[in-house]
Amino acid sequence: MQRIVIFGNSGSGKSTLANEKAGLLSCSHLDLDTVAWLDDRRAPTRRPLIESAKLIEPFLAANESWVIEGCYSGLLDLVILKSTEIIFLNPGVDVCVKNCQNRPWEPHKYDSPEEQDTNLEMLLSWVEQYSQRDDEFSLQAHRRIFDNYAGAKREFKSNERPD
């Protein structure tokens, strides 16, 4: 049984690594973006934490092994104690910005590649503020999760892929 939580800044490679790990382990993958937001793409609104938790619970109950990824410390706190390993992707802001600029279209978030591109400038600005922010998406929130976790954990400070 493997239960892996992957977290870090937007553009750090969480989704790519989570997809790779889930494929290698033949297990389920949960992108926390899918439970963090209400479904209205025209006016992105954060789902209340309790509602997100209600969406995560069936996933945990249905899957013995899994990979969960995201940047939401509040949601990560809901699953971290059930994990067997955590991976903190912390390659630096410049790498995250470049990854965001090269990101393929995410149809689960945007209706078209053009719509995704209209959001890029805002995303890059947000990514660049990672170490200055003090919200649940910040470097300090992610560092707290990593430092306080007592189990198996790894931090990667480059785009190098962990095994």
Image (cartoon, rainbow, N blue to C red):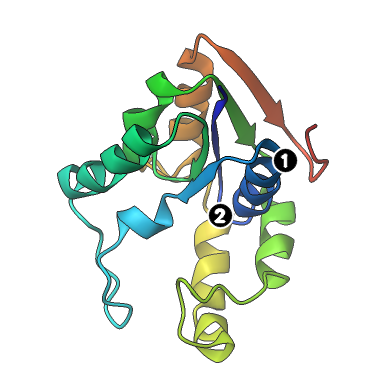
| Type of amino acid under label 1 | Leu
**Disc 2 packing (10 Å; few <14; some 14–19; many ≥20):** many
Q: How far across and down, in percent of the image, does residue 139 sit?
A: 52, 37
Q: Earlier in the sequence, mark 2 or mark 1?
A: 2
Helix, strand or loop at mark 1: helix
**Crowd around label 1: few <14 · some 14–19 · many ≥20 (10 Å):** few
Q: Is residue 76 above or below residue 70?
A: above
Between marks 2 and 1 in the image, the one whose residue lies nearer the viewer: 1
> Dot 2 lies on which element?
loop
What's the residue type where badge 2 is placed? Ser
Name the residue that disc number 1 marks. Answer: 24
Q: Nearer the viewer, residue 144 or 7?
A: 7
Q: Is residue 49 left or right of residue 161?
A: left
Q: Vertically, is 104 above or below 154?
A: below
Q: Nearer the viewer, residue 98 or 16?
A: 16
Point out which mark residue 10 bears: 2
Figure check: 58 above or below 106: above
Q: Residue furthest right?
A: 160
At 38% from the left and 30% from the top, the residue drawn is 79
Where's residue 31, x and y in %? Answer: 47, 52
Q: How many marks?
A: 2
What residue sits 52% from the left and 88% below the top?
112
Query: Splitting the image into 4 quarters, where does residue 21 fall?
Result: top right
Quarter in which the N terminus is drawn? top right
